[in-house]
Image (spheres, helix red, strand yellow):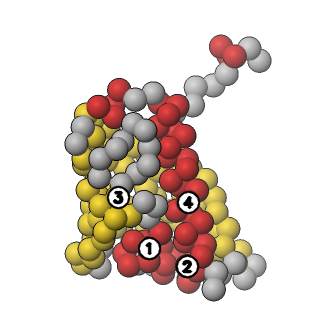
Amino acid sequence: MAASDAPAVDARSFSGEETFAASADRTFAALTDPDVLARCIPDLVSAERVDDRTLRCSVKPGFSFIRATLKMTIVFSEVDAGRRFAALDIASKGIGASMNVRCAMTVHEQAGASRVKWEATIAQLGGLIAAVSPALIRGAADKVIRDGWAALRREVEV
């Protein structure tokens, strides 16, 4: 297949699966706990649990195209423990940058372990960050995602 025939990669959509050496219930409980979530956010400066479904925090990402601190609000818009399904809405703002992300996760039992199927979509990019190369945004997001899953793994696999 020629390079021009390659399918386009949507820099705003991400998905994957993660496996944890912990029960599905333990993994789901960690994924839906704002305190655990705060401990897993890469480049976190501060965090405040507003209520059972809302976390406000500040992050200072180490990306060349975002040097400012971002204020983020993470809201669990849906939590269904019976289906082990959760959806999060993440709004972030900083000088010259704003972003809204929607993330959905389902946790499945897998022979004494758990498997998380997830997908996230950047619903809105604003400010100067909207002009950044999609490949650069994708690379930065991939690193944050990997680091976040690694931190969650340390939380649940104890």
Say what amino acid the circle numbered 1 marks: Arg
As displayed, is residue 7 above or below residue 93?
above
How far is the residue under mark 4 from the one under mark 3? 14 Å
Say what amino acid the circle numbered 4 marks: Asp
> Is 108 in front, or is 157?
157
Which residue does the numbered mark 2 point to in the structure image? Answer: 155
Pointers 3 and 2 in contact (CB under 8 A)? no
How far is the residue under mark 1 from the one under mark 3? 12 Å
Q: Nearer the viewer, mark 3 or mark 2?
A: 3
In the image, taking residue 110 as reference, residue 66 lies left or right, namely left
Q: Residues within 10 Å of mark 3 (few under 14, many from 20)?
A: some
Q: Residues within 10 Å of mark 1 (few under 14, many from 20)?
A: some
On residue 147, the disc is 4
Of the numbered discs 2 and 4, the one sitting upstream in the chain is 4
* Residue 40 visible in the current orientation: yes
x%, y% of residue 65? Answer: 39, 36
Pointers 1 and 4 in contact (CB under 8 A)? no
Say what amino acid the circle numbered 3 marks: Val
Which residue does the numbered mark 3 point to in the structure image? Answer: 59
How far is the residue under mark 2 from the one under mark 4? 13 Å
In the image, taking residue 57 as reference, residue 38 lies left or right, namely right
Say what amino acid the circle numbered 2 marks: Glu
Under circle 1, the secondary element is: helix
Of the numbered discs 1 and 4, the one sitting upstream in the chain is 1
Q: Which corner quadrant of the image does residue 75 belong to? A: bottom left
> Is 144 in front, or is 2?
144
Q: Residues within 10 Å of mark 4 (few under 14, many from 20)?
A: some
Pointers 1 and 2 in contact (CB under 8 A)? yes
x%, y% of residue 10? Answer: 51, 33
Of the numbered discs 1 and 2, the one sitting upstream in the chain is 1
Which residue does the numbered mark 1 point to in the structure image? Answer: 39
x%, y% of residue 155? Answer: 55, 79
